[in-house]
Structures are given as structure tokens and as C-alpha cells.
Amino acid sequence: MLDVEDFGVNPQAPEFGRLGVLYVSHGKAMKGSAPKQRSVLSVFGWASECLEEWMTEIRLALARGRGQMLWPTERGGRVGETRIEDHFASIRRELGLPAVLTFHSLRRSFVTHLIEDGFDARFVQEQQHCPVDIVPVQ
């Protein structure tokens, strides 16, 4: 459910430009609750570079006249969670990785990489519902 305009500038990290913070409006919530809103700060330069390339080159070819969807399909809809999980599982099987590895595992890997790269534990916790004024400590 992400759109191109869901990104913004993080004044504490201007090096990420317009991709400094992602405002998630439709985050996972508890059963029966409204979607959880949160902000996620950009912390890895390579990730914002990849996203910038996606947005300015690849996405434009797919999204012609289809609005501001960040992850459009070639048929004009949004890429869904089931499609992502199916594709991830296909790649996982091709690589011979265990079935316990899911697309959601990447979220846990993100947290592990933050800790291994020396980010403050409080910052890592706050990435779940991060206000823009929190600055990564390295």
C-alpha cells in the first residue's frame, strides 16, 4: 500500500534527500485494530540508491498513467503480499534454503544488520514507530 509520496526528507539525515523517511500508513496492526501508522528512517545509503533507481527508471515503465503506487504490477494493480511471498519462496527453493526462511525474515535481518552496524539499541526499537527526530547513533 505504499505510494511514491509516502517518502519525505529527514532533516537529521539530509544525505538521503527525499528518501530520508518513509511514512507507513497501512502497517500491520493487531487483529481488529486500524492499520498501524509509523515512520521508518533510511539508514543505509545503498538502499536509498536502489530505491531511487527503482522509482526513476523501472517503476516509471510499469506505472504509466497508474498513479503513485510504489510497487505497481505490469497489469496496473499493486504488488500484493501473496505474490511477494510466492516469488520469495520460489527463489528460496532454487537456492536450496530452508522453508523456515520467509520474506518476513528480511525484517529480522534488517534489525540484525542495524545492531551489527553499531546502531543504538533504542534507535533499533524505535524503527517500529519512529518519530522523525530520532537520529541514528553510530
Image (tube, rainbow, N blue to C red):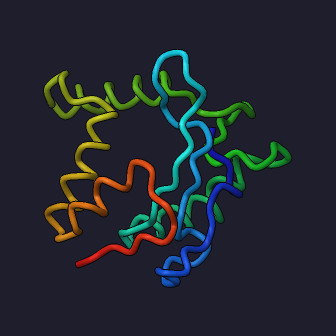
* In the image: residue 123, left or right of residue 41: left
Q: Is residue 57 above or below residue 10?
A: above
- Location of residue 31 in the rendering, given as x and y in whole percent from the top left corner: 48, 17
Quarter occupied by the N terminus: top right
Q: Is residue 28 above or below residue 11?
A: above
* In the image: residue 52, left or right of residue 128: right
Residue 38 or 19: which is nearer the viewer?
A: 38
Quarter occupied by the C terminus: bottom left
Q: In this view, does 68 lie above or below 45?
A: above
- Location of residue 81 in the rendering, given as x and y in whole percent from the top left corner: 50, 27
State which quadrant residue 91 falls in: top left
Residue sitting at the far right: 65
- Location of residue 49 in the rendering, given as x and y in whole percent from the top left corner: 47, 70
Q: Residue at x 42, y 70 (%)?
A: 134
* In the image: residue 19, left or right of residue 106: right
Q: Residue at x 62, y 44 (%)?
A: 2
Residue 93 or 24: which is nearer the viewer?
A: 24
**Total numbered badges shown on the rendered structure:** 0
- Location of residue 70 in the rendering, given as x and y in whole percent from the top left corner: 64, 48
Q: In this view, does 30 lie above or below 20?
A: above
State which quadrant residue 87 falls in: top left
Residue 124 or 52: which is nearer the viewer?
A: 124
Residue 10 or 65: which is nearer the viewer?
A: 10
Q: Residue at x 33, y 26 (%)?
A: 90
Q: Residue at x 52, y 70 (%)?
A: 20
